[in-house]
Amino acid sequence: MSNSNLPIATPCTCAMLRRTTRRVTQLYDQALRQVGVRLTQYSVLAKVARNDGLSITEMAERLEMDRSTLTRNLRPMVRSGWIRIDAGPDNRQRAVQITPEGQAKFAEAQPLWKKTEKALRATVGKEEVEALRQLLDRLLVVAGQP
């Protein structure tokens, strides 16, 4: 991408991150749209597929998401039959389970996600993407400190 195509930078790092995140999310949403999944749903399906039976609280922590936001995002997935929420190990917790329909939807969406991820890495550059990932990991740690 030439510098003339770059958006005008803002002095606010948070604003730049949010703007970039929205734009990149749109790329993934566009690719996943053909199977009826949004990136937020794909992320949840991926997490549940790898960690079936996590409590809502544990899942929210792993996704770095507010518990109420996660609960709101889970509702349409429950209605679609992709996940179910069962009683957890004690009566105070609820466990998120992926259904066979959810496994099928995840399997259908995964190649589209991979294709988008590969295209993004090819466009930006593998080394640049890896450097960005490392920087974002550091930023996560710094932002998580009081």
Image: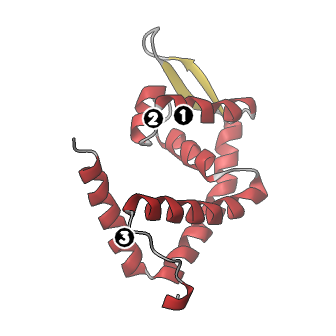
Left or right of residue 60: residue 127? left
Q: Position of residue 110 (x, y in %)?
A: 62, 57
Q: Amino acid at mark 1?
A: Thr
Q: Residue furthest front?
A: 11
How crowded pointer 2 is (Cα within 10 Å; few <14, some 14-19, many 20+) is rated as: some
State yes or no: discs 1 and 2 in contact (Cβ < 8 Å): yes
Left or right of residue 88: residue 139? left
Q: Of label 1 and label 2, which has the lower sequence position?
A: 2
Residue 74 visible, this orientation: yes
Identify the residue under disc 2. Answer: 60
Give the answer, above or below, for where 94 lies relative to 128.
above
Disc tally is 3
Q: Residue at x 67, y 55 (%)?
A: 109
| Quarter the C terminus occupies | top left
Q: Residue at x 64, y 62 (%)?
A: 26
Identify the residue under disc 3. Answer: 132
How crowded pointer 3 is (Cα within 10 Å; few <14, some 14-19, many 20+) is rated as: few
Q: Amino acid at mark 2?
A: Ala
Q: Amino acid at mark 3?
A: Leu
Quick one: SS at disc 1?
helix
Quick one: SS at disc 2?
helix
Identify the residue under disc 1. Answer: 69
**Which circle, 1 or 2, is nearer the viewer?**
1
Cα distance in 3D space between marks 2 and 3 = 24 Å
Cα distance in 3D space between marks 1 and 2 = 8 Å
